[in-house]
Image (cartoon, helix red, strand yellow):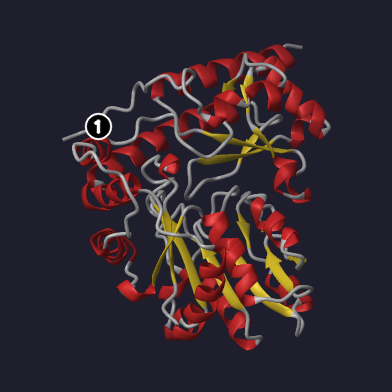
Amino acid sequence: MSYDFSVSTCREDTNAEKYTLREELFGTEDVIPVWVADMDIDTPDFVINSVEKRLEHPVLGYEEVPSSAFLAQIEWMRQEHNVEFELEDMFHSHSVVASMSACIEAFSEVGDKVIVQTPVYPPFFHSVSHCKRKLLKNPLKQMDDGRYTFDIEDLKSKIDDNTKLLLLCSPHNPVGRVWRRDELEEILELCLKHNIVVFSDEIHSDLVYKQNVHIPFASLSQAARDITITAIGVGKTFNMAGFAMSSVAIPNEGLRKRFKEVYERIHFAQGSTLSHVAFESAYTNGKEWLEDLKVHLKKNYNMLEELCLRFPHAIKLIPIEGTYLAWLDCRGMELKNKDLKKFFVNDAKLGLNAGISFGREGSGFMRMNFAVSSTRMQEVIKRLEEALLLKYAN
């Protein structure tokens, strides 16, 4: 069976965040929203069918997450990513950001330092600040080909005895890197040396393009397993953010105990009955759908790449290895950040994320979500092309 991603169901009549917030964020509803990281692609039919079947039972009361749901995820992680987790390692969470905040509380104290590697998804540094910890910024460094890597020497120079936790984004949002083993091992060596716990956000781990391979941080070695909290889930992979269900895997018993104390104090509870069913269905039935999706997403990215190659003086597209989030280097347009946003909103009629929101290292960049139907992507390309042609007509 092959899946068709040429069209998708209209979301403007729903309470979809990316549509309802257009006026607030962009000052107009006359934009195609390609910002927040959910897909304008229908959630798989096998997920919907499983929920419909559960609704044949008329009682939707409190339920525990069934072991079968976690076991389906554990088997998926073993087959797809060559990492082994046990049922006792797993915690339910309604979001990766909630898991991150709980880990900051569990593995550091007020005033301790937490490492973030910018530019990065904004809740990484917001969560640290809200928990009254100190941000230790270790900016990624950009290589000659546009890709990013870790700045290990910078990190070595900044770590001290008060550095307790590293927030790793893997694959990385927004720069699209899928970290190589040797890169991750350099991070591991430093964290082991300085007794630093690693919170590894791997929510985009299934969205990796050939010839790249996602390497879970916990799979590097037994020592890595003993310092790693892994956050994973179905939200990005299968466009299921609305089910508000992800998970946290903690193999080390000591770390698990510390996390559980915060987890129970916050009262994460066990989530939604329908989420349990959808979560299990995605991991049980999703392999073929996901493979077709990744082929489609890469075609969308290639369309954007072809356009940017026609305007290299204006926009350079950072090579992507994973995620469905394109990182656009617009510094060649020589616009201030507010004017860059205006160009995309007013001229191209597109709603993107401003790069500056990912940290000052994102100044002059924009992030585009290209997880849309091929029909919608063609319209996105058409609008951006017309705006660039008009701007550079002379």
Give the image location of residue 78, x and y in percent.
Answer: 29, 67
Give the image location of residue 254, x and y in percent.
Answer: 49, 85
How crowded pointer 1 is (Cα within 10 Å; few <14, some 14-19, many 20+) is rated as few
Q: Quadrant of the N terminus?
A: top left
Callout 1: SS: loop
Residue 169 visible in the current orientation: no
Which of the 4 quarters of the picture holds residue 328?
Answer: top right
- Which residue does the numbered mark 1 point to in the structure image? 3
Q: Measured along the vertical axis of the image, is residue 57 above or below residue 313?
A: below
Q: Is residue 342 left or right of residue 167?
A: right
In front: 245, or 344? Answer: 245
| Farthest bottom residue in view | 193
Give the image location of residue 10, x and y in percent.
Answer: 42, 19
Q: Quadrant of the C terminus?
A: top right
Give the image location of residue 135, x and y in percent.
Answer: 76, 65
Q: Is residue 232 left or right of residue 201?
A: left
Q: Measured along the vertical axis of the image, is residue 220 above or below residue 360?
A: below
Residue at position x 74%, y 50% in the image: 359
Residue at position x 42%, y 46% in the image: 235
Q: Is residue 3 left or right of residue 386?
A: left
| Amino acid type of the residue tagged 1 in the rendering | Tyr
